[in-house]
Image (tube, rainbow, N blue to C red):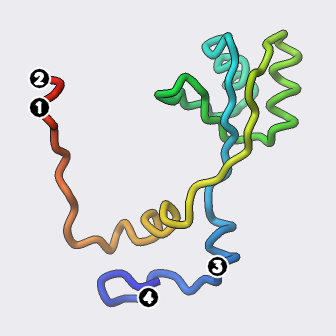
Amino acid sequence: MIGRGRLVAALSMAELAARAPQFVKVRSPEPERLARALRGAGMTVAPQPDGSLSVTGAATDTLAEHARAAGISLHELTPGHASLEDVFIALTADSVEYRAAATTTGRDQ
């Protein structure tokens, strides 16, 4: 990968894919309680706009066991990873010459 005329990383597609952060998408009827339990077990939990939680720091089986131990039912448990585009953007972030400014659409005003 090249950023601003300089070699940023020399990676194969497999190596690039391995750098994609892993996460688990989880849904529960008790998301706040589940988030507390998972954070207490050392996982990082981020609420998502669709009501699900994005969890990093554990595989699906470990996450499910912590939910079971806390007596919390799960409605979805899906492993995922960031896209190759996300990895590319993260690797080349320091090489960006121009950045888009945040904009508002006026709909919220």
Q: Which residue is mark 3?
A: 13
Task: In the rendered view, tell whether residue 56 sits above or below residue 76.
Answer: below
Quarter of the image holding residue 72? top right
Residue at horizontal 19%, vertical 68%? 98
The disc, 1 or 4, on the residue closer to the chain's N-terminal end is: 4
Q: Quadrant of the C terminus?
A: top left
Q: Secondary structure at mark 1?
A: loop
- Of tags 2 and 3, the one toward the viewer is 2
Estimate the x, y position of residue 28 in percent, counting from the top left.
69, 18
Rounded to the nearest angstrom, the CA distance separating label 1 from label 4 is 40 Å
Do the residues bearing badges 1 and 2 touch, measured as CB atoms within 8 Å?
Answer: yes
Do the residues bearing badges 1 and 4 touch, measured as CB atoms within 8 Å?
Answer: no
The disc, 2 or 4, on the residue closer to the chain's N-terminal end is: 4
Nearest the camera: 6 or 32?
Answer: 32
Q: Secondary structure at mark 4?
A: strand
Q: Which residue is mark 1?
A: 106
* Circle 2: residue type: Gln
* Circle 1: residue type: Gly
Disc on res. 109: 2
Nearest the camera: 79 or 1?
Answer: 79
The disc, 2 or 3, on the residue closer to the chain's N-terminal end is: 3
Rounded to the nearest angstrom, the CA distance separating label 2 from label 4 is 44 Å
Q: Which residue is mark 4?
A: 7
**Tag 3: Cα neighbours inside 10 Å, few (<14), some, or many (≥20)?**
few
Q: Secondary structure at mark 3?
A: helix
Task: In the rendered view, tell whether residue 87 sits above or below residue 21.
Answer: below
The disc, 1 or 3, on the residue closer to the chain's N-terminal end is: 3
Residue at horizontal 63%, vertical 16%? 31
Residue at horizontal 63%, vertical 65%? 19
Do the residues bearing badges 2 and 3 touch, measured as CB atoms within 8 Å?
Answer: no
Task: In the rendered view, tell whether residue 31 sits above or below residue 95.
Answer: above
* Circle 3: residue type: Met
